Image: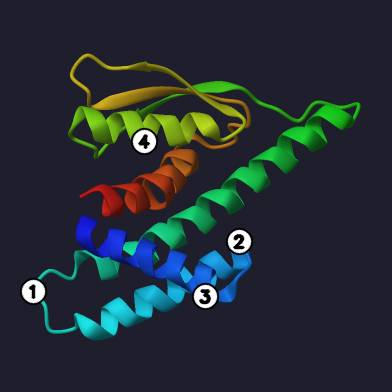
Amino acid sequence: MIKYFLMNLLLSFIWVALQGSLLYSNFIFGYLLGFAVLWIMNRNEVDQRYFYRVPKIISFFFFFLYELIRANIQVAYDVITPKYFFKPGIVRYPVNAQTDFEINVLSTFISLTPGTLILDISDDKKAIYIHVMYLKDEEQFIRSLKTGVERKLLELIR
């Protein structure tokens, strides 16, 4: 998988060099063009993980960017209006992540979102305690994390 990633980067840098201008748009287009070329050349290979993970990584990036912007707007709206809308609470969130790395990455992405903060991880590593700034329904919050960030993140890592 690393081999395909490095070849894809090399193809994107070659594309940028052929274009003669170092722009982000040239690099991204070269990366996508290199991805397509590598995918066509390696369709019959056994190891296809790279070609399945790259679209998932891009999808997760845009999903997390959307969640981040939405949470920032919610917090900013609460700050600039005279009335406070927050209802803080602490949630015990049962995790499906099994390894320390998975739990660490999951807790990092949860903490990056404004309005949430990781307080503690249980000793048996089966639950994360999260302080939530806007907790309307605990079950709905847990369900949204399970089906959103955790599911998509574990698909990438595993």
Sooner in the amino-acid sequence: mark 4 or mark 2: 2
The crowding category of the residue bearing disc 4, from other C-alpha atoms within 10 Å (few below 14, some 14 to 19, many at least 20), is: many
Q: In which quarter of the image is the N terminus?
A: bottom left
Residue at image location 45% in from the left, 61% down from the top: 58
Labelled pair 1, 2 in contact (Cβ < 8 Å): no
Sooner in the amino-acid sequence: mark 1 or mark 4: 1
Sooner in the amino-acid sequence: mark 3 or mark 2: 3
Is residue 1 visible to the viewer in this orientation of the structure?
no
Q: Where is residue 10 in the image (x, y as percent from the top left)?
A: 36, 64
Mark 4 or mark 2, which is nearer to you? Answer: 2
Name the residue carrying label 3.
18
Mark 3 or mark 2, which is nearer to you? Answer: 3
Name the residue carrying label 2.
24
Classify mark 1: helix, strand or loop.
loop
Is residue 63 visible to the viewer in this orientation of the structure?
yes
Sooner in the amino-acid sequence: mark 3 or mark 1: 3
**Distance from label 3 to label 1 (Cα)?**
32 Å
